Amino acid sequence: MKNPPRGRLFFANPGPTNIPDSILRAMQHATVDFMSEDFLEIYDACTEGLKRVLGTKQHLFYYTGSGHAAWEASLVNLFSAGDKLLIVESGYFSDHWAKMAQGLGLATEQVRADWRRSVDLAAVRAALAADTAHSIKGMCVVHNETATGATLPLAEFRKALDETGHPALFLVDTISSLGSIEFRMDDWGIDCAVGGSQKGLMLTTGLSFTGASEKAMAAHKASTLPKHYFNWTLMLERRHKSFIGTVPISFFYGLKEALRLIEEETLPGVWARHHRLAEATRRAVRHWSGNNGPALFTTNPARLSDSVTAVMMPEGHDAEAVRRTAYERFRVSLGGGLGPLGGKVFRIGHLGDLNEPMILGTLAAVEMSLAANSVPHAAGGINEAMRFLAETQPAAKAA
Amino acid sequence: MKNPPRGRLFFANPGPTNIPDSILRAMQHATVDFMSEDFLEIYDACTEGLKRVLGTKQHLFYYTGSGHAAWEASLVNLFSAGDKLLIVESGYFSDHWAKMAQGLGLATEQVRADWRRSVDLAAVRAALAADTAHSIKGMCVVHNETATGATLPLAEFRKALDETGHPALFLVDTISSLGSIEFRMDDWGIDCAVGGSQKGLMLTTGLSFTGASEKAMAAHKASTLPKHYFNWTLMLERRHKSFIGTVPISFFYGLKEALRLIEEETLPGVWARHHRLAEATRRAVRHWSGNNGPALFTTNPARLSDSVTAVMMPEGHDAEAVRRTAYERFRVSLGGGLGPLGGKVFRIGHLGDLNEPMILGTLAAVEMSLAANSVPHAAGGINEAMRFLAETQPAAKAA
Amino acid sequence: MKNPPRGRLFFANPGPTNIPDSILRAMQHATVDFMSEDFLEIYDACTEGLKRVLGTKQHLFYYTGSGHAAWEASLVNLFSAGDKLLIVESGYFSDHWAKMAQGLGLATEQVRADWRRSVDLAAVRAALAADTAHSIKGMCVVHNETATGATLPLAEFRKALDETGHPALFLVDTISSLGSIEFRMDDWGIDCAVGGSQKGLMLTTGLSFTGASEKAMAAHKASTLPKHYFNWTLMLERRHKSFIGTVPISFFYGLKEALRLIEEETLPGVWARHHRLAEATRRAVRHWSGNNGPALFTTNPARLSDSVTAVMMPEGHDAEAVRRTAYERFRVSLGGGLGPLGGKVFRIGHLGDLNEPMILGTLAAVEMSLAANSVPHAAGGINEAMRFLAETQPAAKAA
Amino acid sequence: MKNPPRGRLFFANPGPTNIPDSILRAMQHATVDFMSEDFLEIYDACTEGLKRVLGTKQHLFYYTGSGHAAWEASLVNLFSAGDKLLIVESGYFSDHWAKMAQGLGLATEQVRADWRRSVDLAAVRAALAADTAHSIKGMCVVHNETATGATLPLAEFRKALDETGHPALFLVDTISSLGSIEFRMDDWGIDCAVGGSQKGLMLTTGLSFTGASEKAMAAHKASTLPKHYFNWTLMLERRHKSFIGTVPISFFYGLKEALRLIEEETLPGVWARHHRLAEATRRAVRHWSGNNGPALFTTNPARLSDSVTAVMMPEGHDAEAVRRTAYERFRVSLGGGLGPLGGKVFRIGHLGDLNEPMILGTLAAVEMSLAANSVPHAAGGINEAMRFLAETQPAAKAA
């Protein structure tokens, strides 16, 4: 055992995330018949609730699978071999979706971007405008890039499609934004929203889903990529309008409780809490950076993510050493750098079931781990976070 | 609420199945980093243990998904568009796999069978022998057909391949047999064994897996069906040698406990217990049938399943009415007839975490439900079950 | 391990009893401040709800302790050294309370009774009438004698006090009746009702309580038995009006859920369900007795308990052997004979979270255990129970 | 709801305390027969393990009850009406035990002490020496006074008894020290050690116990205080050698896990961890005090407690306001001042299942709450705590 065994593990990896006890308990449910009326009542209520969280009145398909399953399901249901996707580069995850699309037989065109500055909207607009033949069938955007800690302005992407008159489907990965960062599927004209259970919805890993617009449903009818497990048409023949095979009931007992918690706090309340805890984290990191210390990876202030902060190590210092100290001495689990960022970046997840002392305990452990590894930094980032939290009020709760 | 709310629900649907409290508790685990050494230690031990349950020393791939995901994963990893599969008809599930294969762009040839008598091995042998060009790339057999309550003799199918010198891959669905009915992947020359978490492994729904032989791995290399989420080659690049995307940690905490329970009882002990409870069930059904009552659906005595018993209603009587009474008056959840068997058959699942009073309480409720619906039957099936259980000893436990 | 390890243990010991999953989950609560408003809200609601179950609008004192703690608490709060109690003999538990009273320095007079026929009300009336000096300060009645399976008619005891004009306090042990058998503290003029968490309230063991009338409170003021941990006067100085020392919060999270379940079913619904399952049990036992088999211990039909049935073995046969078989072969835990009934009686608890298949599975195991031990009996008791349950309807649920 | 509803509540009240998930899960156990061999095996192992934690090879009696129950049980089992106890004043809890002793009919003599300086051993020695008639039958010491945050040197008290040749029984309350602070019953010649489940043993409230020496057992034989529920002699007649009435099984499933955790960490490891986190807390408080800020209540540095720190507010500032802010804005539950310390003191519990980020999150919330209430203090206490934790190593774990 590497991790010291006492006290609660502080899980500050950006997903999966902290699960409230009440959700873990709710998921611990004896088996029931997924076709029984008793279960269907809960199931249907969950579907209505999850649509409210997605901000849609259109279609919703669930899968037993992780977030990647939902991406794959969306692609195979919407497209045909050789169709071209415009992939907006955001970081590790946009690269991953591009690779997936290629593996499924789709063509991809990427709008390249510097990972720290985050993509230039003009480049997106240019790519769309250049495609006068409308060979691009879908534009894929990761709302919140978990690898870099950047959030992309979805409404602006919609505008780019509208202004260029481009008919491509608008596909969005909301895996690490839903239930944390403002997301409005219908208002923002999103055709396909891909989400998972294990982040802002505060469930375990294993349930994922696609919100699909009417336009997406029309595209689906024409799609010829081979599919069965993920096939929406087959799903629509079933009572649950989702799932090929056994329905994973425990997730719905959990989702019911998750939706209750979210609605108790209200969605704007959830977003505001995430913003506040994220800003406290950023204040700490900005302070540490003073002394040639570690800095915010994302340099575009308008794109800083409220669900995860990626921290760039100073040259010559190893992010993994900091993570190891945090984990092995202080029982805090941080995220590592993904892909090319390995060793250069560590990530602080601040999404899901989180509050002030949890993030402060985490930031304190990070600051101690920097010191323990002789990483240069301006000490006292924790005080900046505290100052910010003491001066600002949590979002007003719904009455 | 349709189901009366007090006392434990008797879940006698043939899967998902009863989950021991200790497994539900183990799955209720706070989030950890799936890359941490602490988790990997548990993960690796689970993999070793599950291989022992499968009876293989070859390869194992996990998926976040239900059993259908594992079937699809196996097909897309082993075959290429247009490849032909020989599907041995067993019932609803073999039909379903055929449909899936077709949906994925494969060709299928079915060995037809009467669902009650169960397939004739001579027909299988004939189909293989006829394929002198070896255009059949894989033969798919459902070990235990959950819809009809029949178990197919896998070793005989292997012999058919060997005797005809047919090189087709041997694919087996062990979803409703593994951990209930004797299964030996390597001994029986199975190339691809498809299993899921929610039956004999006594977990919730959401983890599934493929055991793959070296021969299957060779076939995989040549496979060109599009894939990403299920792609074994991509999986082998990862530390877990499985999963594209997030690893669903809670299943492994549960699997660790499930394997502990299975090894405590021993695999032969597990099989013997299932056989004994199944036989008690059959004695009850055979007795009921005396009076033009409901009868065992499977008429071939050598094929009767030890994990599920399908009961055929007498002409003119509705299986769904019996199920409704059992559920709404007696808090017993039976399985219904699938596909063409809807209304004609009800099914008693007797797999997973089950013992004598559980099956007897279930059988008593069935007998009362028959009476309540004026279904003709010889009363006293319960006594036959009790007589059998009183006269036989449970399997000796390991010391 | 003596008990075979698979499937759910059927717990048919008459208390503690089966705990619904939802209550076990609710009790699994992280620690909170028992003085916090958040907890007090739950606490106060529990107190109101438990008073409704007790049928009182008067006083309620809780203790961290088992049922015996509540009896001791009641005695030390109501009486002074040398005070005389009239103890109505019902069986093992009335004897125990007498012994307790003596151990605390009280005098006791017992109304003797045959344990099988149950006490004669005339004898009670005679004892009260004889006490013209009113030296008897309290009359103690066990509502439901768990050792013998007999329920005493409390309203008749009240009438005996009224008719003889006797001013003694009326103390009742409702430990194994509350939440199972009709109980009305205020309507029946009970001054002191002693209850516990681990029977009809379906919680774990460790919370007990006294319902106290105004008359009891007046008696309390005069009481001089030494006390502190159980001292009501000290309790009334505290916010919780109960508990000396730490408040055991987990019981209140459980109690909240227990009250929800009870109110969902309604109290009359709870009583009717217990009566129905008890009657099924009695039909089985009466049938078994036909062949010089085991018989109902309680011979007075008006006194048969709806929460536990004591079964008297035929001469020369050992009840413990039957219990051992039930436990070690069939995973059913029966109650043994208490005190002088050891080896002569086994007991079937049928209280708490119980339904038809649970009791039928239990009865089937008992019948098989009788057979396995060559205990003479008329086989087929299980069928009598089934016939009764099939012919009668469960209590109508509240809308 | 006063407490903001998201993220984990930081429970820094000095008891009950944080409960590890694994213990909460273990306690969530279905009902079993407390007389079954399966349970007795666990029970006996718990008793052996708890004796190791107590440091005794002598006697152990359990009660269903809270810590106060164990104190009362100890007194009624050891003494007779009018016996005199020497109560060493430590704070609120020693006062409480004195009051309890009086309520039970015992005489008390108190060695008075200033609560901040903690008792003078010379005064204890003087009181014992003065009692040449040996009318003092027992000396009662609270090992760790939870109200003031002071730990008394038990070995020195033993020496005082030995040096004065006083035969009084040595009674110790180890409720808030056991499993947190070094405690050695046999080595320190303690005759009666009173403990509870809800602090260092990390269980819920409701199980308490007495470790009793042979000398205590001899005294018990002569004791005449009335008793039944707590009567050791009656307990010794029972299989469990403890409990009058139902055995609270869930606590033993929890205790088994608690003992596993403690033995994994080793007792010296547990003590060292508590010391380290306590010292970090004290460094923060000492820093805050710099600016006429709140200060350590206990002024005797040799007596500072490793399980709780009481913090004295500066004149004119309300401790309850600070607690309210911590709870209502920052989801941190602190302890309040008890008795005369109400409003003047708040208390930080740092016992049980605790680690670095938990205590740092708590200290950060305290510092923010001081600021929010304009309580004068030197900002930066959190940094002192971090510096100390970064510079020192956690106790080495057992291999």
Image (cartoon, coloured by chain):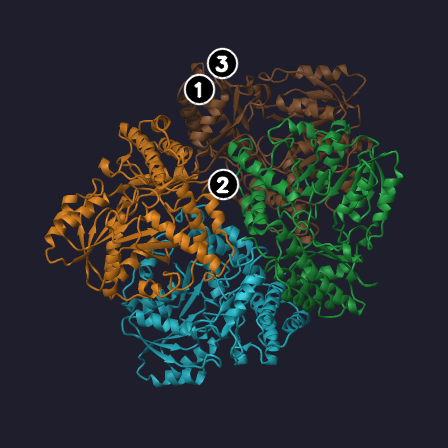
Chain colours: A orange, B cyan, C green, D brown
Q: From the viewer's perspective, is the residue at label 2 or at label 3 nearer?
A: 3
Which residue occupies the foreground of this view, B129 or D4? D4
- Residues at marks 2 and 3, CA–CA distance in whole angstroms: 41 Å
Residue at mark 3:
D315
Quadrant in which the C terminus of chain B appears? bottom right
- Residues at marks 3 and 1, CA–CA distance in whole angstroms: 18 Å
Instruction: Please say if A55 is above or below C343.
Output: above
- Quick one: SS at disc 3? loop
Q: In this view, does D383 lie to the left or right of C332?
A: left
Q: From the viewer's perspective, is the residue at label 2 or at label 1 nearer?
A: 1
The amino acid beneath tag 1 is His
The amino acid beneath tag 2 is Pro
Question: Residue C205 is drawn in which quadrant?
Answer: top right
Q: Check contact, mark 2 vs mark 3: CB within 8 A.
A: no
- Quick one: SS at disc 1? helix
Q: Where is residue C104 in the image (x, y as percent from the top left)?
A: 80, 34
Q: Is tag 3's residue or tag 1's residue first in the polypeptide sequence?
A: 1
Residue at mark 1:
D287
Residue at mark 2:
A5
Q: Is residue D375 left or right of residue D49?
A: left
Q: Say which chain tag 3 marks.
A: D
Q: Say which chain tag 1 marks.
A: D
Q: From the viewer's perspective, is the residue at label 3 or at label 1 nearer?
A: 3
Other residues around mark 1 within 10 Å, as few (<14) / some (14–19) / many (≥20): many
Give me the residue at 72% from left, 64% from top.
Answer: C283
The amino acid beneath tag 3 is Glu
Q: In this view, does C364 lie to the left or right of B302?
A: right
* Residue D17 visible, this orientation: no
Question: Residue C382 is drawn in which quadrant?
Answer: bottom right
Q: Say which chain tag 2 marks.
A: A
Give me the residue at 46% from left, 23% from top.
Answer: D322
Q: In this view, does D225 lie to the left or right of A121?
A: right
